[in-house]
């Protein structure tokens, strides 16, 4: 069932599985503020039955990042150009960027598992969109790069936190400051990619992973994800306590004693 189809973003849902597809292959799925609004809208349109969201892209590239039209004086029709944004007050500018970030935040909701199927280039905003997902299955031709710093900017679409969490501070700093490509072998070795497969097998690999993710009971998946997501912010003793509380809820639910 198609739930959304606008501005290069297509959303379908089939019971427990939703698929978000970037549909502008002629521009290598370059992103714009309209893309980000559509992605945020896709998150809001998900039915309650959805447990796994697959993010994929048409064409040879996952996403080449921000559409370079953003750097022109005129920018996009109906959108503030970068020079115009720079002249806004701090609260106004903060609100605009926060709005852009909404496209990247909902993928890690506790009640969802999100899987990015990444092929070809995933640059800048494309890299950050892949990082927004819980898991990444990559084709063997994948090329990640964070180019914002090279353009005089910073990665501001929520990608810095997961990047540091996955590869560590030193490697994340080097990737961002050099803007170099991270290819499939390094992506898998450093944890950026959960799995690397031949490009022709990408869709099949994602289907297999999705089926495996759906095998466990939903409430147990939600509790486990919450435990793991919060582990880095808790002390060892706090994490032990969180485990006990989560297990108590699961035991009571399985015994029919839950609220």
Image: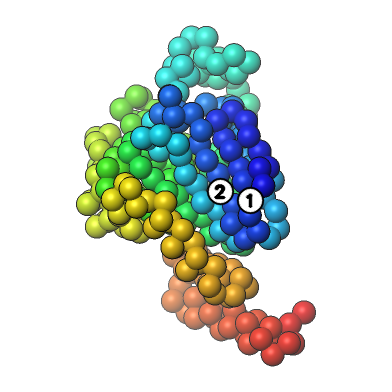
Q: Residue furthest right?
A: 259
Badges 2 and 1: C-beta atoms under 8 Å apart? yes
Identify whether 72 is placed above or below 230.
above
Q: How is the image coloured?
A: rainbow
Q: Residues within 10 Å of mark 2 (few under 14, many from 20)?
A: many
What label does residue 13 carry, if any? 1
Identify whether 52 is placed above or below 236.
above
Looking at the rendered structure, the secondary structure element under dot 2 is strand
What label does residue 95 carry, if any? none
Looking at the rendered structure, the secondary structure element under dot 1 is strand
Give 92 or 99, whichever is nearer the viewer: 99
| Sequence-first disc among 2 and 1 | 1
The answer, for residue 67, to whether it is visible in the render is yes
- The residue shown at (62%, 30%) is 6
Q: Residues within 10 Å of mark 1 (few under 14, many from 20)?
A: many
Give the residue number, with chain letter if any, for mark 2.
19
What is the x, y in percent for residue 108? 54, 55
What is the x, y in percent for residue 45? 69, 45
Q: How many marks?
A: 2
What is the x, y in percent for residue 116? 45, 49
Left or right: residue 17 compared with residue 64: right
What is the x, y in percent for residue 30? 45, 28
Q: Residue furthest left?
A: 185
- The residue shown at (74%, 87%) is 257
């Amino acid at each position: 069932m198609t739930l959304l189809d606008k501005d290069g973003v297509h959303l379908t849902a089939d019971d427990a599985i939703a698929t978000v597809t970037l549909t502008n292959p002629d521009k290598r799925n370059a992103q714009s503020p309209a893309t980000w609004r559509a992605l945020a809208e896709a998150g809001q349109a998900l039915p309650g039955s959805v447990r796994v969201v697959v993010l994929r892209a048409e064409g040879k590239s996952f996403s080449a990042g921000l559409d370079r039209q953003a750097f022109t004086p005129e920018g996009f029709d109906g959108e503030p150009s970068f020079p115009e944004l720079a002249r806004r007050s701090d609260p106004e500018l903060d609100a605009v960027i926060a709005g852009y970030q909404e496209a990247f935040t909902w993928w890690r909701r506790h009640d969802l598992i999100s899987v990015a199927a990444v092929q070809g280039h995933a640059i800048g905003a494309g890299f950050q969109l892949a990082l927004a997902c819980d898991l990444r299955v990559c084709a063997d031709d994948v090329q990640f790069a964070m180019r914002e710093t090279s353009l005089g900017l910073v990665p501001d679409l929520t990608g810095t936190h997961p990047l540091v969490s996955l590869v560590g501070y030193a490697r994340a700093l080097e990737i961002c400051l050099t803007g170099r490509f991270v290819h499939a072998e390094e992506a898998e070795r450093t944890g950026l990619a959960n799995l690397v497969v031949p490009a022709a097998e990408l869709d099949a690999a994602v289907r297999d992973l999705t089926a495996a993710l759906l095998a466990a009971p939903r409430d147990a998946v939600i509790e486990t994800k919450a435990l793991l997501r919060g582990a880095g912010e808790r002390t060892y003793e706090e994490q032990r306590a969180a485990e006990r509380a989560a297990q108590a809820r699961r035991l009571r639910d399985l015994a029919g004693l839950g609220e």
